[in-house]
Structure formats: structure tokens, C-alpha cells
């Protein structure tokens, strides 16, 4: 499971509109390691719903700022459909701020 091709195409079409310092609000399908890295390299922050299918938040770990608020390191994912040299050049982890929000 992953991002639908239409959503990825839409992001690529909008890419030229994004500037350093922008904040992109996305759905859970855009909270992948690869997409978040691309945005971070562009200087764009993202706010996204957590994709529970791929990760579990553990607020006992990382640098804590309060209940339900911390920064953690997401390790580089395993090599899939990517050239070895490109994968090797990627950073070993991404620092991500996770915040728990209760919506009622």
C-alpha cells in the first residue's frame, strides 16, 4: 500500500509552487519517508496525519516536549525499487516531530 499515483502526480505538478519556509498540509498517504525527505530538502515543512499502517508512535522515545509531543528519528527504509547508489546516498534517518492531537 502507498500513495495513489494521482496524488504523487499532483505533488509533482505543484512542486514548482513550493518554496523554502512553506508548510504543506497533506493526508496520511503523503507521510512517507521518501516524500517527507523530498520536502525537507526543498525547505518545505509538512503537516500530515500519521499513517498507522507503516509506523507506530511511541511518545516515550525521542526528545520530548510534553505529553504527546516529541521529535524522533525515522530510520532510512529498506531498499525497494531504487538504485543502490541512490539509496546509499540517502541520509540514515529523518528527524520528525510527532504531535498527538485529539479530534472530536
Image (cartoon, rainbow, N blue to C red):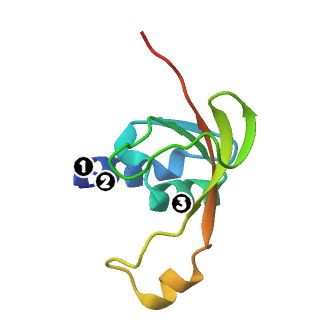
81 lies left or right of 66: left
Q: Do tag 2 and tag 1 residues touch (Cβ < 8 Å)?
A: yes
> Which residue position holds label 3?
38
Q: Residue at x 64, y 51 (%)?
A: 72
Q: Secondary structure at mark 3?
A: helix
**Image quadrant in which you'd find residue 39:** bottom right
Camera-side residue of 19 and 56: 56
Quick one: SS at disc 1? helix
Residue drawn at x 38%, y 80% as measured from the top left: 82
Q: How many marks?
A: 3
Closest to the observer, 12 or 99? 99
| Residue corresponding to mark 1 | 6
Q: Is residue 49 above or below residue 7?
A: above
Which residue bears the numbered disc 2? 9
Q: Report crowding for label 2: few under 14, some 14 to 19, many 20 or more residues within 10 A (C-alpha).
A: few
Q: Position of residue 102 (x, y in %)?
A: 49, 18
Residue at mark 2 to residue at mark 3: CA–CA distance? 14 Å
Nearer to us of marks 2 and 3 is: 3
Amino acid at each position: 500500500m502507498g500513495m495513489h499515483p494521482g496524488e504523487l502526480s499532483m505533488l509533482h505538478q505543484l512542486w514548482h509552487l513550493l518554496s523554502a519556509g512553506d508548510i504543506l498540509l497533506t493526508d496520511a498517504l503523503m507521510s512517507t519517508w521518501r516524500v517527507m525527505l523530498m520536502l525537507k530538502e526543498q525547505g518545505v515543512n509538512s503537516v500530515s496525519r500519521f499513517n498507522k499502517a507503516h509506523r507506530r508512535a511511541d511518545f516515550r522515545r525521542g526528545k520530548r516536549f510534553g505529553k504527546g509531543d516529541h521529535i524522533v528519528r525515522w530510520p532510512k527504509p529498506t531498499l525497494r525499487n531504487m538504485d543502490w547508489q541512490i539509496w546509499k546516498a540517502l541520509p540514515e534517518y529523518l528527524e520528525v516531530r510527532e504531535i498527538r492531537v485529539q479530534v472530536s
